[in-house]
Image (cartoon, rainbow, N blue to C red):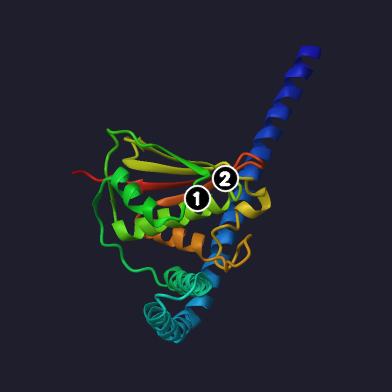
Amino acid sequence: MIDDNCVELQRKITKLEQQLQSDKQRHAADLAAQEELIRHEKLALLAQVADIVGHELRNPLGVINNAVYFLQTVLAEADATVKEYLGIINGEIAEAERIVSDLLDAVRTKPPQTDIVDVAALIAQTLPRCQIPADVDVRQHIPETLSAIRVDPAQMQQVLWNLVTNAVEAMPQGGLLEITASEDKQAHSVRIDIHDSGAGIAPEQQNRLFQPLFTTKTRRIGLGLAVVKNLTQANGGKVAVNSESGKGATFTIILPAGSE
């Protein structure tokens, strides 16, 4: 009799555990759907102003950039302070242009011009564009036998640039940046992981990272990761993040493999 009661109790516990797991999965799916809906609503709102803002800002930025170039030419013999401030202006122009580009890319993704691309070559072309301090150690783990991917090279360089730049900014005191690639032959896909040894990302922030206008950084308007998601999806891929407090963060993109 006792054995029968134990069996029945165990059966009820198992059923409750299964129900709890099902409820968790349903809640996660509902949350993901809600986040995606919010994301699309924000993109629609941004689209209404992106073209106007982009046009209105790029013209004066171009004028300022030309003026700085002229001053750098005629003041070639100026003292170090003048050259320093002209360099600061140049840097701020580049930052403003990056924000405009991110705004336009976030709401108006061009159809990808896909090609067969070698992953190691793609990373090698991207890293020199990134400002990586001397105190950040970059390590790459790219198998020589890794299949190529079928993507738009320019768009994927933009994706990798954003992810590497974010990883570097997450390590203001220096650290380790690891870029790892692997292949799932059954799924016919290639996975690229970009890991930093920074402080990590809070759990409550991870679901919102790819939302337009969400940022945890000063002097950012929260478009870089929205661009990453848009361009990755446009190229038939997926992007995800995994992070633990104090153990850094890993951004993963999964892209379709291509044949030579």
**Visible residue check, residue 233:** no
Outermost residue to the left? 260
Quarter of the view holding residue 193:
top left
How would you rate the neighbour count of disc 1 (Cα within 10 Å): few for under 14, some for 14-19, many for 20 or more? some
Eyeballing the image, is 66 above or below 18? below
Could you tell me how many numbered marks the image carries? Answer: 2
Residue 180 shown left or right of residue 133 in the figure: left
Residue 128 shown left or right of residue 200 in the figure: left
Judging by the rendered image, the residue that carries numbered circle 1 is: 133
Q: Nearer the viewer, residue 1 or 259?
A: 259
Q: Nearer the viewer, residue 212 or 32?
A: 212
Q: Quadrant of the N terminus?
A: top right
What secondary structure is marked by label 2? loop
**CB-based contact (under 8 Å), mark 2 and mark 1:** yes
Q: CA distance from mark 2 to mark 1?
A: 8 Å
| Disc 1 residue type (three-letter) | Pro
Task: Measuring from the top left, give residue 87's x and y in whole percent.
Answer: 48, 71
Judging by the rendered image, the residue that carries numbered circle 2 is: 174
The residue at 33%/33% (across/down) is 143
Task: Measuring from the top left, give residue 240's x and y in whole percent.
Answer: 50, 49
What secondary structure is marked by label 1? loop
Task: Measuring from the top left, give residue 5's x and y in whole percent.
Answer: 78, 19
Q: Quadrant of the C terminus?
A: top left
Who comes first in sequence, dot 2 or dot 1?
Answer: 1
Q: Nearer the viewer, residue 36 or 155?
A: 155
The residue at 43%/71% (across/down) is 101
**Visible residue check, residue 72:** yes
| Disc 2 residue type (three-letter) | Gly
